[in-house]
Amino acid sequence: MNEATYKSNRPFAVVTGASSGIGYELARQFAEHGYDLLITSQHEHIADAERALGEFDVIVESLQADLAISEGIEKLYSRIQQDGRPVAAIAINAGVGVSGDFTRDTALEDELNLIRLNVIAPVHLAKMVIRDMVRQGSGKVLFTSSIAGTMPAPFLAVYGASKAFLTSFAQAIRNELKDSGVTVTVLMPGATETEFFHRAGMEDTKLGASDKKDDPADVAKDGFEALMDGKDHVVAGSFTNKIQAAAGHLLPDPVMAGMHRKQSEPGTAEE
């Protein structure tokens, strides 16, 4: 634990997947609202994010760790314990997408890595951090899911399923924690202008090529405000996202799968 961290009386927050995109903007929200931060990502750019957040009058520390492996989770949790401060809030945001035809185009190892990062890592990290929050009688937890989790997602089959799991998991433990002083909130963005589409190989899809994606700063603001208000979830970004999320709960799965396919099938970028 460094001396500056020890002497700080500001609340302490942790953000995963914070090197860019929604995660970075969530970190900015916490910093703007007076939280000291521990930010993490598997990418070396996490150090750049730490420097950029230096404009705020808070302590920001970064950790490069691969949360898709258990050693990365343990490394992060050890760092949290090392700082010796109660975690007031954690944004479990790190995630990845894999795009393409499940039987022909995608690699099994890529999809297993997705499951490790999008599903196993949030469960592993939440298990440890939320137990500490319950012992201290307070805390706020934000899980970044997606409106893709409300519907079958052709050509993003494993990704969509991982987000459906995450939403269900978060809402279940929120109910379990209702008398603990700990709240759980699910952030559900739609298409957002981040590196996600490039990393998932989606440039040749209508969704990936769209110029109508949401601003990650707006999405993060929606998520932060919902977290602070203790809401169960927020569909962030445009009004279209809210319509799509509602449709995902109301329309039959085959209908929603067909609608999603028109946006995510490779080769649809020019249609």
Image (cartoon, helix red, strand yellow):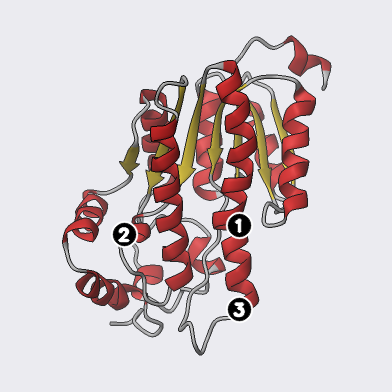
Left or right: where 259 falls relative to 13: left
Q: Amino acid at mark 3?
A: Leu
Q: Secondary structure at mark 2?
A: loop
- Badge 2 is on which residue? 212
Q: For the residue carrying disc 2, how many other residues have a C-alpha within 10 Å: few (<14), some (14-19), or many (20+)?
A: few
Q: Which residue is found at the position 53% from the left and 46% from the top? A: 93
**Dot label at residue 108:** 3
- Badge 1 is on which residue? 117
Do the residues under discs 1 and 3 have CB atoms within 8 angstroms?
Answer: no
Q: Position of residue 184 (x, y in %)?
A: 44, 33
Closer to the camera, 137 or 111? Answer: 137
Left or right: where 154 falls relative to 101: left
Rendered position, 29 above or below 18:
above
Q: Which residue is found at the position 24% from the left and 60% from the top? A: 248
Q: For the residue carrying disc 3, how many other residues have a C-alpha within 10 Å: few (<14), some (14-19), or many (20+)?
A: few
Q: Which one is closest to the eye, mark 1 or mark 2?
A: 1
Q: Quadrant of the N terminus?
A: top right
